[in-house]
Image (spheres, rainbow, N blue to C red):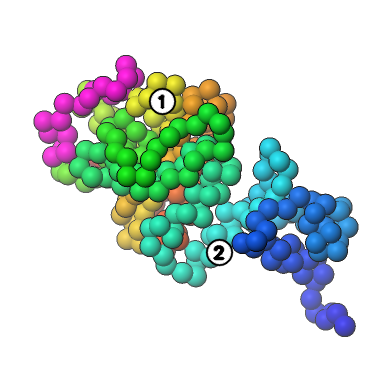
């Protein structure tokens, strides 16, 4: 017997969300309707409503649905995790949203070290091995991490650093790099256009610990031709995923889009 104090629509929405699990991570509309014994039209309306709240997301290429960022955000509100546990679900969602290579890097002196990576779903992709190093001044992740340094630490890092040119777009002037890092700190993200590899673009955003300190950077990298098609949307997706990873590390009150660069 149905409890009259409950709402059938809410119950069905909950059933939709609970249908996704480790054995079945994605569903098509008809497939999910059969699974839940609901009509296709009802299932479509439920998915569309949940998608508007970012509780599910639709892959534009396949039309299939998976759990969205807001679900992971709810989980983040109940637990604190280490960096690997915190970043992997947001990385997975970010790769699904963009189709490009997703990576997490940490700063080691003047270099960024990539500690996590998920490869692009495209045949033509950017290859970044876990453990690989690159110069921080010419990568999306590296610029985010440099921009988060305290002014005195940044100046010590830049002192005597003959910024190497990996391409003709690499910033090699320290004053120009300082200006770039101020923009990164202000905007809350960094863009690398052909600065480390010709024909490649990456976008990075900071991952913060519960104290608000930047402990890593999350980025998406791909061929310029694909990345330029909707760079603003990719940037939003990177920033949202990095913010989610930060919340999964624990609550913090750090303001969005600000940094410590003087």
Q: Residue at x 53, y 28 (%)?
A: 124
Q: Residue furthest left?
A: 160
Farthest residue toward the top?
Answer: 168
Side of 96 where 81 appears, left or right: left
Residue nearest the viewer, comparing 253 with 25: 25
Q: Is residue 250 visible?
A: no
**Residue sitting at x 34%, y 27%:** 196
Q: CA distance from mark 1 to mark 2?
A: 34 Å
Q: Position of residue 56 (x, y in %)?
A: 66, 54
Q: Is residue 99 left or right of residue 110?
A: right
Badge 2 is on which residue?
Answer: 74
Residue 251 on image: x %, y %:
42, 63
The part of the image, by quadrant, that contains residue 99 is top right
| Quadrant including the C terminus | top left
Horizontal and vertical percent position of residue 85:
43, 60
- Tell me the residue that label 1 is attached to: 193
Q: Main secondary structure of the magenta part?
A: loop
First to last magenta residue range:
154-172
Q: Tag 1's secondary structure?
A: strand
Using the image as rendered, state which of residue 50 and residue 22 is in the foreground: 22
């Amino acid at each position: 017997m149905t409890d009259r104090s409950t709402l059938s629509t809410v119950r069905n929405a909950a059933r939709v969300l609970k249908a996704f699990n480790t054995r079945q991570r994605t569903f098509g509309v008809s497939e999910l309707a059969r699974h839940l014994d609901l009509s296709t039209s009802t299932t479509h309306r439920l998915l569309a409503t949940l998608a508007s709240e970012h509780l599910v997301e639709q892959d534009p290429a396949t039309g299939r649905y998976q759990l969205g960022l807001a679900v992971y955000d709810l989980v983040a509100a109940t637990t604190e995790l280490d960096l690997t546990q915190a970043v992997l679900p947001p990385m997975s969602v970010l790769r699904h949203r963009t189709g490009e290579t997703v990576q997490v890097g940490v700063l080691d002196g003047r270099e960024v070290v990539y500690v996590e990576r998920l490869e692009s779903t495209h045949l033509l992709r950017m290859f970044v091995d876990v453990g690989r190093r690159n110069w921080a001044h010419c990568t999306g992740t590296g610029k985010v991490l440099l921009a988060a340094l305290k002014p005195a630490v940044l100046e010590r890092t830049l002192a005597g650093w003959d910024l190497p040119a990996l391409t003709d777009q690499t910033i090699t002037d320290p004053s120009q790099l300082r200006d770039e890092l101020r923009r990164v700190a202000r905007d809350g993200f960094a863009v690398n256009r052909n600065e480390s590899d010709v024909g490649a673009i990456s976008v990075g955003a900071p991952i913060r610990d519960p104290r608000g300190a930047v402990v890593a950077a999350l980025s998406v990298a791909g061929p310029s031709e694909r990345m330029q098609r909707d760079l603003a949307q990719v940037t939003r997706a990177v920033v949202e995923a990095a913010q989610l990873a930060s919340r999964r590390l624990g609550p913090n009150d750090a303001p969005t889009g600000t940094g410590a660069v003087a």
